Image (cartoon, rainbow, N blue to C red):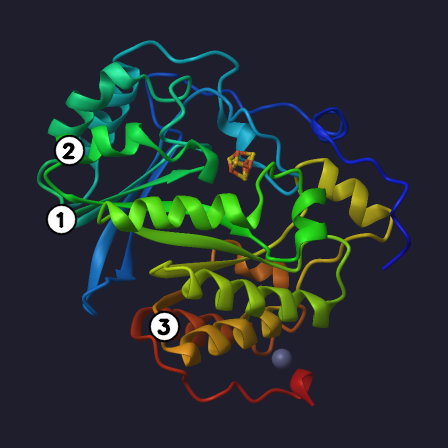
Amino acid sequence: MNETKDLIINDQWIVSHRGDKNSVDPRRPYAWIVEKERTVNGSIEDTAIIFLTNRECSFHCLMCDLWKNTTDITVPAGAIPEQIEWALERMPGAKHLKLYNSGSFFDGRAIPEEDYPRIASLVSHFETVIVESHPKLIGERCLSFRDMLKPLLHVALGLETVNTDLLLRLNKKMTLQDFAHSVSFLKSNEILTRAFVLLRPPFLTEQEGIYWAERSLDFAFRIGVECCTVIPVREGNGAMDHLMEQGHFSKPDIRSLEAVLEYGIGLNSGRVFADLWDLNLFSTCPKCFDRRAERMNHMNLNQVISAPVECTCSQ
Ligand code: SF4
Ligand SMILES: [Zn+2]
């Protein structure tokens, strides 16, 4: 990768490269889906995901495009429960629910704390509720929400990478100690953590991308994370497109995602998933794409390493 030491990556630089946000309604989630997921108990069950519309995350991570479906100001009290109710009325039943809010559930400017009791009541029939948060926002609010919930609470945190120079450049505003501290806090309060790990953030070669994703999985499990999701990094948020044009970022290859998934499952330390959304972005070989997608889906659900895909692109 080209020399980039003189490139200052901060909030201002990242935000200045953005395009427009999508138009969103503060009283409606911007999406919802139901998909199969391997649970902590080893069964494969339906998991619903509601993508809540709320105020933009106050962090500005380099690779993040979640701001696209957010509002500029805090949504009114009552809007988040209304979104959840609206989605639940329309979606097929599921045992588990992810409430993903393009930021941190425990950011009081994103999800008003006064809405917690109604949210807890609306989701009381699920077995598990999973929310996402920046590690620095883990604290008493998690416990307050957990205490209102009938389902078990799991929290998803972005670890991103254990390459500390790179973590700084991602503008995550977090150290590995911050991350470990949050995992330990959650664990001591009987809340399971899942970590998001990036495959090939900018400034890395393909091989370095694999190497750091694998070291990140090692670290996550060593400090007590229960589940990891590996996310192949993509362009599309302005800043990443700029880095791509300048030769500082290339998308990872689908085969690297398979390799990291195999590595993670082989650790036998907890669940490891490959994020398969928009998977076609990472394939340049139409001959084997469907088979690779199917293989990773099978590995996600069964947590065993399946037979490799044979193709001329692997030779
Ligand atoms: S903390 Fe999460 S949602 Fe917020 S900018 Fe970073 S990656 Fe995006
Ligand atoms: Zn191929």
Q: Does residue 273 lie above or below 18 as drawn? A: below
Q: Which residue is mark 2?
A: 147
Q: Which element carries disc 3, helix, strand or loop? A: loop
Q: Disc 3 or 1, which lies upstream in sequence?
A: 1
Q: Which element carries disc 1, helix, strand or loop? A: loop
Residue 2, by quadrant, is: bottom right
Choose between 24 and 223: the one closer to the eye: 223
Residue at 16% from the left image edge and 31% from the top image edge: 89
Q: Which element carries disc 2, helix, strand or loop? A: helix
Q: Which residue is mark 1?
A: 127
Query: Quarter for ligand 2?
Result: bottom right
Q: Does residue 86 lie above or below 275 as drawn? A: above
Q: Position of residue 63 (x, y in %)?
A: 64, 43
Q: Position of residue 36 (x, y in %)?
A: 27, 59
Q: Does residue 7 lie above or below 76 as drawn? A: below
Q: Is residue 274 visible?
A: no
Q: Position of residue 86 (x, y in %)?
A: 22, 26
Choose between 168 and 69: the one closer to the eye: 168
Q: Does residue 45 lie above or below 68 as drawn? A: below
Residue at 67% from the left image edge and 68% from the top image edge: 284
| The N terminus lies in quadrant | bottom right
Task: Give the total number of marks visible in the rendering.
Answer: 3
Q: Is residue 171 visible?
A: yes
Q: Which mark is residue 269?
A: 3
Discs 1/2, front:
2
Asked whether the residues under the numbered discs 1 and 2 touch, taking CB atoms below 8 Å apart as contact, a structural biologist would say: no
Asked whether the residues under the numbered discs 3 and 1 touch, taking CB atoms below 8 Å apart as contact, a structural biologist would say: no
Discs 3/1, front:
3
Choose between 167 and 103: the one closer to the eye: 167
Identity of the amino acid at label 3?
Ser
Q: Disc 1 or 2, which lies upstream in sequence?
A: 1
> How far is the residue under mark 2 from the one under mark 3?
28 Å
